Amino acid sequence: MADPQKILIVDDDDAIRTMVERVLRRAHFQVESARDGYEAIQKLAKDDYGTVLLDLMMPRVDGHGVLRFIEQEHLAPKVIVMTADLAGAARTSGSPPVSRVLSKPFDIRQLVSEVRLASGVA
């Protein structure tokens, strides 16, 4: 079973990924990251995560590809989509692992609150 406090951050923007990592570590989450969907799929195939923070627009494999992998492999993380692509985000609404969509730029306090909610950590 996945550790609810173990988070995978998937974003090709180094600044966003690093900032989210720091903030979630300070909130006492175990954090790992991936620079694109390809790296995310490699990590998801090896390890269990309670929550995945997922950008949609990335090179090699985009966020939709990661969502397909999660569904095909019957993985169970909660997914919070972080995107500026609102049209793409609308396509994720029918995807069972997606628990929330946050549009970029997002409020970091709201992100932490959503991660706590998704992971069941109050």
Image: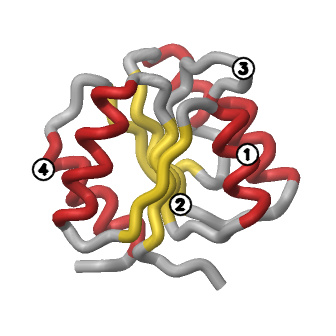
Q: Residues within 10 Å of mark 1 (few under 14, many from 20)?
A: some
Q: Which residue is mark 2?
A: 78
Q: Position of residue 29 (x, y in %)?
A: 32, 70
Q: Which of the two discs, 4 and 1, sits closer to the camera? A: 1
The amino acid marked with disc number 2 is Lys
Residue placed farthest to the right in the image?
72
Task: Tell me the distance, in whole angstroms, between the alpha carbons under discs 3 and 1.
Answer: 11 Å
Q: Which mark is residue 41?
A: 1
Q: Quarter of the image holding residue 103? A: top left
> What secondary structure is found at the residue carrying circle 1?
helix
Q: Which mark is residue 60?
A: 3
The amino acid marked with disc number 1 is Ile
Task: Tell me the distance, in whole angstroms, between the alpha carbons under discs 3 and 2.
Answer: 23 Å
The amino acid marked with disc number 3 is Arg
In this view, the residue in front, 64 or 26, is 26
> What secondary structure is found at the residue carrying circle 3?
loop
> What secondary structure is found at the residue carrying circle 2?
strand
Q: Position of residue 113 (x, y in %)?
A: 21, 59
Task: Tell me the distance, in whole angstroms, between the alpha carbons under discs 1 and 2.
Answer: 15 Å
Q: Which residue is mark 4?
A: 109
Q: Is residue 67 left or right of residue 90?
A: right
In the image, residue 122 above or below residue 38: below
Q: Which is nearer the N-term, disc 4 or disc 1?
A: 1
In the image, residue 42 above or below residue 106: below
Q: Which is nearer the N-term, disc 3 or disc 1?
A: 1
Task: Tell me the distance, in whole angstroms, between the alpha carbons under discs 4 and 1.
Answer: 27 Å
